[in-house]
Amino acid sequence: MSFRNLGVTPALCDALENEGITSPFPIQVATLPDAIGGRDVLGRGQTGSGKTLAFGLAMLTRLNGRTAKPHKPLGLILSPTRELAVQINDVIAPLSRRVGLGSQVVAGGLSYIGQIQALKRGVPIIVATPGRLIDLLEKKHIDLSDVMITVLDEADQMADMGFLPVVKEILSLTKDDGQRLLFSATLDRDVDTLVKRFLKNPITHSLENEKSRSVDMSHHILILDQGHKDEISTQIAARTGKTIFFVRTKHGADKLAEKMLRSGVPVGVLHGGKSQGQRTRVLKAFKEGRANALVATDVAARGIHVDDVSLVVHVDAPADHKDYLHRAGRTARAGATGTVVTLATHKQKKAVFGITNRAAVKLIENQVRPGDQELVKITGAQKPSGIPIAAEPEKPSRNDRKPGSRNRAPKREGEFKKRREGGGRFAKSDFKKEFKKEAPVSDRYSRPDRADQSERPARSERPNRFEKSDRTDRSTRPERSARPAKKQPRMPIEKRKALDEKRSPSGRPAFKKTAGEKKFTGKKFDGPRKPKKA
């Protein structure tokens, strides 16, 4: 079976062959013919089974040759997290360009202006998170009335994160007769409401109980003392190969990573408290092998794909069986093999077995101590070098920058002097600083236009200007009636001549009695007089 036999566009098949992808995975074989045919599809498969290419190839094949209008995309892919949205776009973008289409990520933490400009130009495919998409919808930057195909990836997680009302609102804005593809690892009660309301006669393809998964992945529980957990985790992190450590909280992730760095293990940290730029740099370092260990919260449990991850360690037990499966799905992807280890104390053992029983996973139990042969056999643990590694300083996010600090280089000593000697321009502020630095104090504060200050009398000998004198004594002032009258200012001669010309023979001011007209000709007049009543 090949992609051409499944109905995929030849240009996409050629692009896949150039990347070495020639044989489709089972989820792709099951869903592609129906999805390309225009039917609503409900696909259920384990994480890492190839769902992204399954709905991506179907969407690109159906939209081939179409052009999107400004602000009106033709295809929409919804994902719960921005990491998953970026990863989906990384898979879709190279293929979309081969068929003359384009794609754009619409998610929080990324360039807001860049997303708006891309929508203004017209982008056929949008890969979005629900929060940012609703924001752009409310501000009229995007219109979903032309969306032909809508994909919901990891719909169960969107329901768990509280996005279900928002997702319903988004789906209601798309075409009523549009195609809907829903891919999820589990189908619970909340996701079932989406299926019943928005999917029309969907065909279900379920590959949840794939037998090959149990062969590719082995699950272990290591019973240990609580005081040995950090030391054992550090020894596992020093192994050869890529390892992901899952913890419950952001503080716990930072604390464990700090201990590993002090022991000489290069490690990255990934959690929701990091900015998008920091998370991208950490993932890039982990993928390139500059750090073989990654400490993360459940933000990395879904959608994060890194090649050659051979071990996943649950430092803190997951909350439920779905989280266990998604964490474990970071290894043994695309036919590879991997190991999943859970660290637990004797008190936590019962709860861990309850979670794995609901996930239909069989655990192998072992009791370990730091440096045990059994620990080395299962995980490949090694003793770390013990040479502390300094963590790379993280660039501040946009919200952490001080006002006015953007694009300002630090000032270097002597820079003003070099610019002045070279004859170039220099800032006024630099001139002031240089003047204050070089000018002597006596020259700065001397006043040549004033007499020598040393000849001034002492402060105690100076007259007090606030003391009362005979001139200000009110008892010696004459009575008000005996004071000379104030001289009234004379009216300008031009104004007096104008008034004399307008005076009537009786000597009274003359007015023009026009209805509604107010005119001043010498005395205050508020308007025409009202006629007397008869």
Image (cartoon, grey):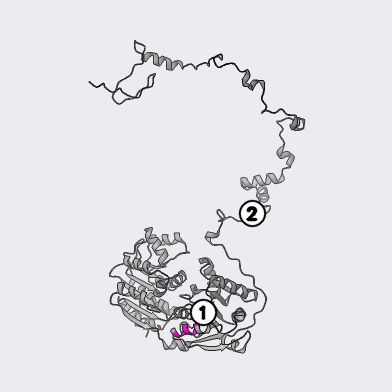
Closer to the camera, 450 or 260? 260
- Tell me if residue 226 can be seen: yes
Q: CA distance from mark 2 to mark 1?
A: 51 Å
Residue 1 sits inside the magenta stretch: no
Residue drawn at x 71%, y 40% is 444
Work out which residue is located at the far front of the displayed protein and give it. 475
Residue 149 position by quadrant: bottom left
- Tell me if residue 238 can be seen: no
- Quadrant in which the C terminus appears: top left
Q: Mark 1 falls on what kind of element?
A: loop
Residue drawn at x 71%, y 34% is 447
Residue 355 sits inside the magenta stretch: yes
Work out which residue is located at the far top of the displayed protein and give it. 505
Q: Which residue is mark 2?
A: 411
Relative horizontal placement of residue 528, taking residue 275 as reference (left or right): left
Looking at the image, tell me whether mark 2 or mark 1 is earlier in sequence order. 1
- Quadrant in which the N terminus appears: bottom left
Residue drawn at x 43%, y 15% is 496
Percent coordinates x, y for residue 348 in the rendering: 53, 82
Q: Is residue 490 placed above or below 87 in the rendered structure?
A: above
Check disc 2 and give the amino acid type.
Lys
Q: How many marks?
A: 2
User: Which secondary structure dominates the residues rendered in magenta?
Assistant: helix
Q: Which residues are magenta?
A: 351-357
Residue 268 position by quadrant: bottom right
Percent coordinates x, y for residue 232 in the rendering: 61, 81
Closer to the camera, 519 or 411? 519
Q: Which residue is mark 1?
A: 317
Disc 1 crowd rating (10 Å Cα; few below 14, some 14-19, many 20+) is many
Check disc 1 and give the amino acid type.
Ala
Q: Tell me if label 2 and label 1 are in contact, CB under 8 Å.
A: no
Disc 2 crowd rating (10 Å Cα; few below 14, some 14-19, many 20+) is few
